[in-house]
Image: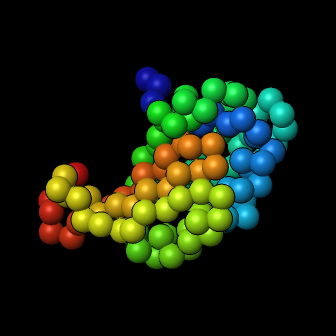
Amino acid sequence: MSRLLRGCPVLASADIPAAVDWYRERLGFEVRRTGPDYGIVEKDGVELHFWPCQDRSIAENTSAYLRVDDVDRLHASFEGAREGGRISEVADRAWGMREFYVWDPDGNLLRCGAPVAGSGPV
């Protein structure tokens, strides 16, 4: 029997070396691979991959959801996203998750969240 081990979102990028640098400098990811044809960054065992794409509308319609253990602490560590990207405030959502959102310079959306305390399993 085979089983899934983890997922690695693959995000569109017009300039992979610039995207990899932004994730390293602004969000604290480690670079695993960078080049014009593919890039990989990693933080806390979570990998994000990048493929070359000049159509910004693809990135702007792409997202990845990252489950985290401390939303507020991660939000504080991602404040560098304001430089070149965007970051929302942290909020409790109607669907039982405490979340914030980060948009990278290419327009990809990272949704970061954890269950709201006492909301039950999500």
Expressed as whole percent of the image width and height from the top left, the position of residue 114 reads: 33, 61
Instruction: Give the residue displayed 54% in from the left and 30% down from the top.
Output: 57
To which quarter of the image does residue 67 belong?
Answer: bottom left
| Farthest right residue in view | 35
Q: How is the image coloured?
A: rainbow
Above or below, 77 against 17 in this view is below
Instruction: Give the residue displayed 62% in from the left and 69% down from the top.
Output: 80
Above or below, 59 against 41 in this view is above
Above or below, 41 against 43 in this view is above
Residue 121 appears in the picture as rendered: no
Q: Nearer the viewer, residue 31 or 94?
A: 94
Instruction: Give the residue displayed 63% in from the left and 43% down from the top.
Output: 106
Instruction: Give the residue displayed 73% in from the left and 64% down from the top.
Output: 25
Expressed as whole percent of the image width and height from the top left, the position of residue 15 reads: 76, 39
Expressed as whole percent of the image width and height from the top left, the position of residue 82 reads: 58, 66
Relative to 75, 55 lies left or right = right
Residue 83 appears in the picture as rendered: yes
Q: Nearer the viewer, residue 75 or 88?
A: 88
Expressed as whole percent of the image width and height from the top left, the position of residue 60 reads: 51, 37
Q: Nearer the viewer, residue 90 or 85?
A: 85
Callout count: 0
**Split into 4 quadrants, where in the image is the N terminus?**
top left
